[in-house]
């Protein structure tokens, strides 16, 4: 179940925090509760992605994206992601989440997030690509960024590893072949 109580709490926190720049890092603090655990008594991988949602919402609030979405009657959807898990987060453990807009191209905003343990180790890292949409389809990121109040929406250089991932995603068959699902 989606953690709506956490969402409300985190959005209240984000609304009270000062705005940040388009590519600045939003830092939030969380705890792994018993309902976040899997059978191995660590943060469930599905819940990890849900908590990353919360970090993205807080970051979107602080950079002005939610205001632009509301004003223009736009929406936002996730269009793909890649996740790397490296350290376990155990029950009741506190951790820090870092969220930021990494770069963009002609269709997508690329968002980078990571979870950090108190001892300084990175537990997981995700890169998600998101599309701003309206009733006609995808809104170009440059239009969304301009609507957020940032004058120059010239795309930032995309890191090579993000370009490689994006290229691999473009080559991936869609819809998937039926015989590969067996």
Image (tube, rainbow, N blue to C red):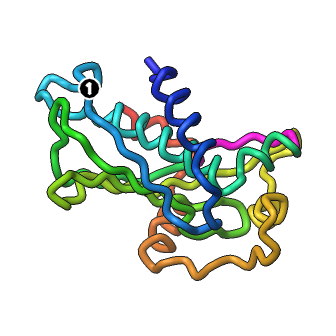
Q: Where is residue 80 in the image (x, y as percent from the top left)?
A: 52, 49
Q: Which residue is drawn at 48% across and 78% down?
A: 159
Q: Residue at x 72, y 45 (%)?
A: 66
Q: In which quarter of the image is residue 182?
A: top left
| Quadrant of image for the N terminus | top left
Q: Residue at x 81, y 42 (%)?
A: 74
**Callout 1 crowding tier (Cα within 10 Å): few <14, some 14–19, many ≥20:** some
The local secondary structure at tag 1 comes to: loop
User: Was residue 73 drawn as part of the magenta stretch in this picture?
Assistant: yes
Q: Quadrant of residue 20?
A: bottom right
Mark 1, residue position: 33
Nearer-the-camera pick, 40 or 32: 32
Residue 63 vertical placement versus 166 (above, below):
above
User: Was residue 6 drawn as part of the magenta stretch in this picture?
Assistant: no
Nearer-the-camera pick, 135 or 57: 57
For the image, the number of numbered tags is 1
- Residue range in magenta is 72-79
Q: Residue at x 64, y 66 (%)?
A: 22
Q: In this view, does 9 lie to the left or right of 105?
A: left
Residue 103 vertical placement versus 129 (above, below):
below
């Amino acid at each position: 179940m989606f953690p709506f109580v956490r969402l409300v709490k985190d959005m209240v926190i984000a609304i009270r925090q000062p705005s940040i720049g388009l590519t600045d890092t939003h830092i939030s603090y969380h705890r792994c509760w018993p309902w976040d655990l899997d059978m191995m008594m660590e943060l469930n991988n599905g819940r990890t992605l849900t908590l990353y949602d919360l970090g993205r919402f807080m970051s979107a609030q602080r950079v002005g994206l939610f205001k632009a979405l509301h004003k223009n009657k736009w929406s936002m959807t996730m269009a793909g992601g890649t996740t790397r898990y490296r350290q376990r987060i155990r029950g009741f453990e506190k951790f820090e989440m870092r969220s930021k807009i990494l770069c963009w191209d002609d269709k997508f905003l690329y968002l980078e997030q990571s979870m950090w343990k108190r001892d300084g180790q990175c537990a997981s890292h995700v890169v998600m690509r998101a599309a701003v949409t309206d009733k006609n389809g995808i809104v170009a990121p440059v239009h969304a960024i301009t609507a957020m109040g940032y004058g120059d929406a010239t795309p930032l250089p995309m890191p090579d590893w993000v370009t490689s991932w994006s290229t691999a995603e473009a080559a991936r068959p869609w819809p998937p072949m039926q015989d590969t699902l067996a």
